[in-house]
Amino acid sequence: MPWFVYMVRCRDGSLYTGITKDLDARVAAHSAGRGARYTRSRRPVTLVYSRRARDKSAALRAEHRLKRLTRAEKLALTGAPAGLARVRRRTTC
């Protein structure tokens, strides 16, 4: 079974990158609050990028390369408009 490296966009506009063997189940887990701690409070998530890898080692290397990209480079990779380059943060009073 192949591995995948993926990127999801969270409700607040932030991006999360990870690897998995079952892409559909992993994205569903993120959206249900059973995924990574980071995405639990930022649901729902939307899959914006995925790529197959031949094995876990290749997926981990690809994930590392993706995580080193700037936000603008990640958005360009996903085909998102340049206007999303900044995450809009809510202010609390």
Image (cartoon, grey):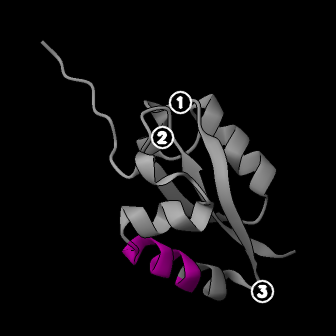
Q: Can you tell which mark lies on residue 43?
A: 1
Q: Work out whether mark 2 precedes mark 3 in sequence or the reverse, and give the earlier one.
A: 2
Which of the pair 73/28 is nearer the observer? Answer: 73
For label 2, the SS is helix
Q: Residues within 10 Å of mark 3 (few under 14, many from 20)?
A: few
Image-based side of 90 in relation to 2, left or right: left
- The question of residue 48 being in magenta is answered with no
Residue in view at x 58 percent, y 50 percent: 8
Which residue appears farthest toward the left when viewing the image?
93
Which of the pair 68/60 is nearer the observer? Answer: 68
Q: Residues within 10 Å of mark 1 (few under 14, many from 20)?
A: some
Q: Can you tell which mark lies on residue 39?
A: 2
Quarter of the image holding residue 4?
bottom right
Badge 3 amino acid: Arg
Q: How far apart are marks 3 and 1 (CA)?
A: 30 Å
Compared to residue 85, the image places residue 87 above or below, namely: above
Q: How far apart are marks 2 and 1 (CA)?
A: 6 Å
**Which corner quadrant holds the C terminus?**
top left
Q: Residue 86: image x %, image y %?
A: 33, 47
Q: Can you tell which mark lies on residue 54?
A: 3
Residue in view at x 40 percent, y 63 percent: 72
- The question of residue 63 being in magenta is answered with yes
Q: Work out whether mark 3 precedes mark 1 in sequence or the reverse, and give the earlier one.
A: 1
Which of the pair 16/26 is nearer the observer? Answer: 16
Quarter of the image holding residue 45?
top right
